[in-house]
Image (tube, rainbow, N blue to C red):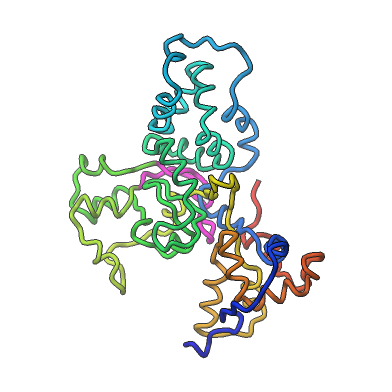
């Protein structure tokens, strides 16, 4: 198998570039997979235009709050707000101006309302906002890696509020499997009361997965792993190779996830994840077959943070080729794949 590995993927840490060149390398040889964002719960930017300001700033008028709340220490108020679930927090902002100003002053809330509006809307519309506190939301926003594979995670799995990468979601990992209530009841010895204790929610109409399944009606789904634990099932049995004993419905995992950027709380910067245009170029060339081609597709679908991509760049011959043909980022590489220009395969949506 090693002999089939394309030379483009053999790591070569002798490749050197200056820190000044790093931004140009990223701009020239990487791209954001917009289609990964579209494959999960997604909202048009137009839907946010009317609420973006109101969700993060307070009205400019005198406060009419009761005097008692003003006498509470700010530190105590902050702790209370951080422990509130998102649904209660939003309701609290609507009580009066003083509460709204106190919540809006929190760095955690500002980071979420500024950088994670899609995930916030997804929580509210699926009615899962009761399960996630402001503290939990902020922690996820500041978490960089997938909870399973430890690679960069560009998504959040809403029912269990876990960071995940697109590859783990696509592979159907047990932790990210969902199913309908009737299917759960058929497979697990759980009564209605036990089912009601699981984290269920109604899906949102939309288009899901890379196959663009259209879901028009809302259906109630629950996490398979939770049902398995509640019934005392054997997780290892579900993970064994071979035909799964439980029928999977992959699109439901996409209907349970949403894009969530990574927020670096120290540098106050945001990363949405980038993929390698050089890895796509390797596939476009059509010169590899067999296991090497399978490896190339997986490499193409990898998503990196800035530092991770620069490490990858050192060992990716095709990315280096694109960089070399760009005259150090001054022009677009002549062989830049169309998929990199478009941000993936799926057509843009309004």
Quarter containing the C terminus:
top right
Q: How many marks?
A: 0
Q: Position of residue 14 (x, y in %)?
A: 62, 79
Q: Position of residue 131 (x, y in %)?
A: 36, 38
The answer to whether 80 appears left or right of 102 in the picture is left
The answer to whether 172 appears left or right of 246 in the picture is right
Q: Position of residue 71 (x, y in %)?
A: 43, 13
In this rendering, the answer to whether 119 lies above or below 172 is: above
In this rendering, the answer to whether 33 lies above or below 62 is: below
In this rendering, the answer to whether 318 lies above or below 136 is: below
Magenta residues, as a range?
202-221
Q: Position of residue 106 (x, y in %)?
A: 51, 31
Whether residue 203 appears in magenta in the rendering, the answer is yes
At a point 26% along the width and 40% down the height, the residue shown is 196
Residue at the limit of the structure toward the bottom, as seen here = 3
Answer with the quarter of the image where residue 239 lies: bottom left
At a point 34% along the width and 43% down the height, the residue shown is 200
Camera-nearest residue between 203 and 17: 17
At a point 49% along the width and 46% down the height, the residue shown is 141
At a point 51% along the width and 38% down the height, the residue shown is 121
In this rendering, the answer to whether 221 lies above or below 131 is: below
Camera-nearest residue between 210 and 228: 228
Answer with the quarter of the image where residue 281 lies: bottom right
The answer to whether 185 appears left or right of 307 in the picture is left
Camera-nearest residue between 162 and 51: 162
Whether residue 160 appears in magenta in the rendering, the answer is no
């Amino acid at each position: 198998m090693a002999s089939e590995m394309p030379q483009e993927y053999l790591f070569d840490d002798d490749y050197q570039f200056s820190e000044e060149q790093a931004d140009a390398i990223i701009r020239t040889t990487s791209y954001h997979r917009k289609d990964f964002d579209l494959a999960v719960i997604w909202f048009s930017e137009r839907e946010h235009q009317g609420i973006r300001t109101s969700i993060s700033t307070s009205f400019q008028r005198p406060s009419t709050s009761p005097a008692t709340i003003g006498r509470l220490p700010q530190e105590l108020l902050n702790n209370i707000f951080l422990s509130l679930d998102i649904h209660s927090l939003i309701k609290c902002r609507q009580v009066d101006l003083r509460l709204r100003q106190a919540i809006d002053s929190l760095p955690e809330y500002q980071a979420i309302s500024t950088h994670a509006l899609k995930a916030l809307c997804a929580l509210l519309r699926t009615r899962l906002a009761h399960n996630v506190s402001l503290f939990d939301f902020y922690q996820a926003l500041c978490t960089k890696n997938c909870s399973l594979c430890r690679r960069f995670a560009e998504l959040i799995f809403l029912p269990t509020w876990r960071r995940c990468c697109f590859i783990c979601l696509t592979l159907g990992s047990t932790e990210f499997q969902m199913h309908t209530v009737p299917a759960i009841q058929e497979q697990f010895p759980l009564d209605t009361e036990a089912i009601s204790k699981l984290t269920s929610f109604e899906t949102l109409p939309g288009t899901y997965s890379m196959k663009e399944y259209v879901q028009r009606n809302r259906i109630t789904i629950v996490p398979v792993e939770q049902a398995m634990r509640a019934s005392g099932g054997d997780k290892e049995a579900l993970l064994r190779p071979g035909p799964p004993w439980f029928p999977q419905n992959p699109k439901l995992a996409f209907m349970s996830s949403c894009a969530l950027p990574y927020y670096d709380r120290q540098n106050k910067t945001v990363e949405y994840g980038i993929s390698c245009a050089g890895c796509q170029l390797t596939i476009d060339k059509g010169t590899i077959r067999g296991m090497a081609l399978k490896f190339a597709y997986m490499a193409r679908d990898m998503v990196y943070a800035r530092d991770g991509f620069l490490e990858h760049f050192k060992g990716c011959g095709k990315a280096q080729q694109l960089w070399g043909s760009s005259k150090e980022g001054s022009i677009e590489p002549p062989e830049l794949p169309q998929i990199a220009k478009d941000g993936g395969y799926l057509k843009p949506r309004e």
